[in-house]
Image (cartoon, grey):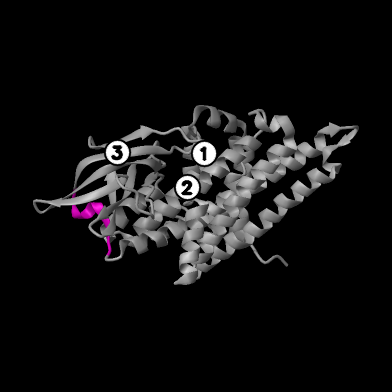
């Protein structure tokens, strides 16, 4: 018996996504990469499938499904398009989660219903280690509050209907929600190494007046609350890395069986077999960590440490698997005629979005020593 058992609903979702990917996503993946955008019709179908609001509670019109099910969906999606999987992860893990956890009843009613109806939200990256002159700041003046700043990583920024912006406020952190159509809010293009279709932009805000309903969170220890949100998101991002790992293996197995050298398939060569087995080990190790972290979250147990370990392990595994897949493909692995170079670029970009291996190791060590 497998340690990870999917229920009937999770199997159904996996099957539906697999069919959708084969019929409608795989044929346009090269166009997504070339045009750096997901076609609107694909986004509309993902919305119809309920994936953008998969974890939103049913009382707000969402699917009300758990983190395990979200990971199943993200893992399957990322095997075809990690960019699309990232958009779904951001909407569920960053945007919907932050509103569910920190917003007022009225704000939940407003924005969670929008997400359930297919709206896409943007989440602006927040560095958990301070970077001078970078990010957003809330100032108090004349009895009011004003938001200003810029950040080069606004996830889903190109397609978002609204923005969730973490900002420094005194000694704490707040989350602000901004509508798209505001003159003081502007998204600007950012060219990424990977995740080219994920709609990542930069965001700049100039002295935006904040009302009480614009603030999702004012916590005495906002940074701790924000880290908890990021740890939850790392579970979803880890599932994407797992899917990239699997995609690298699938492509490598197929190619190694077809490619002939010295009169035999290269899958018969010990060096190739070693690399295939190493990718498989990475997949199984990552899967156990990702789904255990998701399970702990669903049981309301402490998942933060395991989420960081899962993220570190799965992202490093996906990067190394991408490199091995390129090696197995030889010179063809460096061309865009085969997808393995994209798997590597997406994995390396995802590793950055997860916080980076150095920062993750630092956070893990900090918790061990506390």
Secondary structure found at label 2: helix
Q: In the drawing, what numbered circle is on residue 353?
A: 2
Q: In the drawing, what numbered circle is on residue 108?
A: none
Find the distance from the CA under tag 1 to the CA under tag 3.
Answer: 21 Å
Instruction: Tell me what residue is drawn at x 27 percent, y 45 percent.
Output: 178
Q: In the drawing, what numbered circle is on residue 195?
A: 1
* Residues marked 2 and 3 touching at CB (< 8 Å): no
Secondary structure found at label 3: strand
* Residues marked 2 and 1 touching at CB (< 8 Å): yes
Quarter occupied by the C terminus: bottom left
Q: Quadrant of residue 56?
A: bottom left
Mark 3 residue crowding within 10 angstroms, few (<14) / some (14–19) / many (20+): some
**Pointer 3: what residue?**
204
Q: Nearer the viewer, mark 2 or mark 1?
A: 2
Q: Is residue 228 left or right of residue 17?
A: left
Magenta stretch in the rendered image = 210-219
Residue 5 part of the magenta segment: no
* Place of residue 131 in the rendered image (x, y in percent of width and height, measured from the top left): 34, 49
């Amino acid at each position: 018996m497998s340690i990870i058992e999917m229920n009937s609903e999770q199997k159904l979702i996996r099957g539906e996504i697999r069919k959708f990917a084969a019929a409608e996503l795989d044929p346009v993946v090269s166009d997504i990469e070339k045009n750096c955008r997901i076609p609107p019709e694909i986004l509309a179908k993902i919305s119809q499938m309920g994936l953008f609001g998969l974890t939103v509670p049913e009382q707000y019109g969402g699917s009300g499904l758990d983190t395990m099910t979200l990971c199943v969906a993200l893992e399957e999606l990322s095997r075809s398009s990690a960019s699309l999987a990232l958009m779904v992860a951001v909407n569920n893990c960053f945007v919907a989660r932050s509103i569910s956890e920190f917003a007022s009843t009225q704000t939940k009613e407003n924005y969670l219903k929008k997400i359930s109806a297919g709206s896409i939200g943007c989440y602006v990256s927040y560095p958990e280690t301070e970077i001078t002159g970078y990010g957003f700041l809330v100032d108090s003046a004349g009895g009011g509050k004003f938001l200003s700043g810029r950040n080069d990583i606004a996830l889903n920024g190109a397609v978002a209907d609204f923005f969730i912006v973490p900002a420094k406020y005194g000694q704490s952190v707040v989350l602000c929600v901004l509508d798209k159509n505001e003159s003081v809010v502007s998204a600007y293009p950012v060219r990424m190494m990977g995740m080219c279709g994920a709609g990542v932009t930069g965001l700049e805000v100039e002295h935006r007046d904040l009302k009480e309903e614009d603030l999702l969170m004012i916590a005495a220890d906002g940074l701790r609350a924000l880290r908890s949100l990021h740890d939850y998101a790392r579970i979803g991002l880890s599932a994407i890395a797992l899917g990239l790992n699997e995609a690298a293996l699938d492509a490598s197995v197929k190619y190694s069986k077809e490619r002939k050298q010295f009169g035999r398939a290269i899958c018969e060569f010990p060096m190739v077999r070693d690399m295939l087995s190493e990718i498989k080990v990475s997949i199984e190790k990552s899967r156990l960590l990702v789904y255990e972290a998701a399970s702990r979250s669903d049981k309301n147990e402490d998942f933060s440490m395991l989420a960081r370990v899962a993220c570190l392990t799965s992202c490093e595994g996906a990067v190394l698997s991408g490199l091995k897949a390129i090696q197995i493909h030889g010179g063809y692995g460096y061309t865009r005629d085969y997808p393995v170079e994209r798997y590597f670029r997406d994995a390396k970009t995802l590793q950055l979005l997860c916080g980076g291996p150095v920062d993750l190791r630092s956070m893990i060590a900090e918790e061990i020593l506390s």
